[in-house]
Image (cartoon, grey):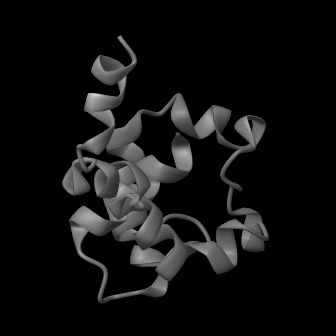
Amino acid sequence: MLLFVLAGCDKAPDDKASQRLDAPSQGQLAYESHCISCHSNSINGAPIPGKPKMWASRILQGVPVLVFHAINGYGLMPARGGKESMSDTDVEAALKYMVN
């Protein structure tokens, strides 16, 4: 019986699966590269990820509206957070990362 149990131990883990679990998401990478300086410090009222009360009224508008605002600018936030090199996909991914 012990041999049967140990027989499964010699298999190497699926490297691709473990990389997917450990790798940061596109949204996390975009947030950490472009958005963190304002959103982690609530500069100009930027909502902080992980603070649901700061996001509540914004989330009620719906993600498409938030993505539109993030891409085009809204209030004191410049378009793309002032990072013109960010793609629409990266902006959307960063926003979804922060909201979640």
Count of numbered circles in the view: 0
Please give left or right for residue 87 compared with residue 63 in the image.
Answer: left
Q: Could you tell me which residue is drawn at 35 percent across and 65 percent down?
A: 91
Q: Could you tell me which residue is drawn at 50 percent across and 64 percent down?
A: 74
The image shows residue 55, relative to residue 74, as above or below, that is: above
Q: Could you tell me which residue is drawn at 35 percent across and 68 percent down?
A: 72
Question: In the rendered view of the protein, which quadrant contains the N terminus?
Answer: top left
Q: Could you tell me which residue is drawn at 38 percent across and 48 percent down?
A: 21
Taking the image as drawn, is residue 68 in sight? no
Q: Would you identify the image quadrant in which residue 35 lies?
A: bottom right
| Residue 79 in picture, x, y percent from top left | 41, 76
Going by the picture, which residue comes out furthest to the top? 1
| Residue 11 in picture, x, y percent from top left | 23, 43
Q: Would you identify the image quadrant in which residue 73 lies?
A: bottom left
Q: Would you identify the image quadrant in which residue 22 lies?
A: bottom left
Q: Nearer the viewer, residue 98 or 76?
A: 98
| Residue 89 in picture, x, y percent from top left | 23, 63
Q: Nearer the viewer, residue 77 or 2?
A: 2
Taking the image as drawn, is residue 67 in sight? yes
| Residue 57 in picture, x, y percent from top left | 64, 34
Q: Nearer the viewer, residue 1 or 64?
A: 1
The image shows residue 87, relative to residue 63, as above or below, that is: below
Please give left or right for residue 100 compared with residue 69 in the image.
Answer: right
Please give left or right for residue 94 compared with residue 10 in the image.
Answer: right
Please give left or right for residue 90 compared with residue 23 in the image.
Answer: left
